[in-house]
Amino acid sequence: MAFEPLPIEDARREIVSCTQIQELEALRIKYLGRRGLIQDLMAKIPMLAVDEKRLYGAAVNDFKNKLTAWISEKETLLKTFKGSDPALGCDITLPGKKVLLGKLHLLTQVKLEICSIFGSLGFKVFDGPEIETEVNNFEALNIPLDHPSRDAFDTFYIKSPQSTVHSPQKKEKNKNHGPSTMDRRLLRSHTSPAQIRAMQACEPPLAIIVPGRVYRPDAVDASHSFMFHQVEGFVVDTDIKFSDLKGILIAFAQEMFGSKTKLRFRPSFFPFTEPSAEVDISCFLCEGRGCSVCKRSGWLEILGSGMIHPHVFKSVGYDPRKWRGFAFGMGVERIAMLKYGVTDIRLFFENDIRFLEQF
């Protein structure tokens, strides 16, 4: 008679899935006990044909050896991880480890939110280099040679052969043609140079937003850093008015800080805009009543703005008699500090997980 296949895989699965010593002992009795499966299989050997006895006996003996090894291995594993899940190889009675999920830095969140708001208003994102020329950073923006911001105490200049004049011939050339021939490199002190690059690269009409890092040699304290982030925005078209600027900024402020936010425009001066204005928002914490954040004034300064100066248009080859535009710029850290109540700008860069995980 032909003998039936041995239940090797079924036995293996039962032993592997066993999680308790008591369960394993029951399986040992089931397979290897005096009345277990192996004894039943051995009892069938005398009933087989002579040529089948040897093959069947060897198969049953091999099955028995495998069972013995599997049960012994499982017993060692269960005793080693007593009261735990041996499949995991760890003690599940111990407290679990918290899984930390990564997320965007607060400044990145605020920058993306600003860009998203202006994107919904039709602005396109433009990127510019952080190492700029003196022409783009100052001259093309109508910033005169004697302006304080061009001093080495206010700008990070980069030492290079182009930025140092040694020979009398070079000195004479610079004297005759002005400072632009030096074409010195520097770390941009604002994102406005990207405005020049965008207008040189694109034909109007334009509506562009420029986020990025900027650098100034300021002493680091609670409200100043030598590296921070700005967002520059500007629009150029044939029929742009100051009222268009006001409408855009009101829409942005109410989306960023709440629908009840009011704006106040104060006359100011920037070389690259005329007229120019500083923009304040009504304090969204005290709703204009006055608090410690707004210094009891009810207003918070958030950005500078104005109509693009005709000299800026001339520097990029636009006809100022045809094209008009407005520009504005804001600090990302300033917006984040106001919106989330952060009192020290240094917290953004210290990488303290206790601070970062709050956002």
Image (cartoon, rainbow, N blue to C red):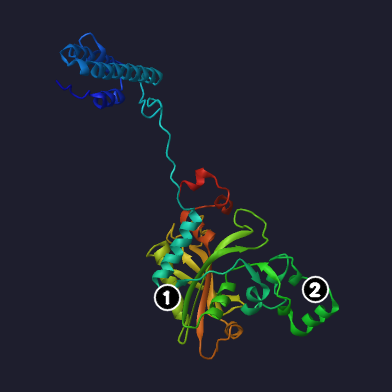
Q: Is residue 52 above or below residue 113?
A: above
Q: Which residue is mark 2?
A: 165
Q: Quick check: marks 2 and 1 in contact, CB under 8 Å?
A: no
Q: Position of residue 209 (x, y in %)?
A: 49, 71
Q: Position of residue 224 (x, y in %)?
A: 62, 58
Left or right: residue 215 compared with residue 285: right
Residue at screen point 49% across, 53% down: 105
Q: Residues within 10 Å of mark 2 (few under 14, many from 20)?
A: few
For this orientation, the residue located farthest to the bottom is 321
Left or right: residue 315 compared with residue 110: right
Q: Nearer the viewer, residue 231 or 14?
A: 14
Q: Earlier in the sequence, mark 2 or mark 1?
A: 2
Residue at screen point 59% across, 52% down: 346
For this orientation, the residue located farthest to the right is 168
Q: Which residue is mark 1?
A: 247
Q: Is residue 209 above or below residue 41?
A: below
- Marks 2 and 1: which is nearer the front? 2
Q: Is residue 26 in view from this perspective?
A: no
* Amino acid carrying mark 2 in the image: Val
Left or right: residue 89 compared with residue 216: left
Q: Position of residue 102 (x, y in %)?
A: 45, 47
Location of residue 39 (image quadrant): top left
Q: Nearer the viewer, residue 196 or 83?
A: 83
* Amino acid carrying mark 1 in the image: Gly
Pick the quarter of the image with the N terminus: top left
Q: Nearer the viewer, residue 303 or 90?
A: 90
Dot 1: element: helix
Mark 2 vs mark 1, CA separation in Å: 48 Å
Dot 2: element: loop
Q: Residues within 10 Å of mark 1 (few under 14, many from 20)?
A: few
Q: Which mark is residue 148?
A: none
Q: Is residue 320 above or below residue 327?
A: below
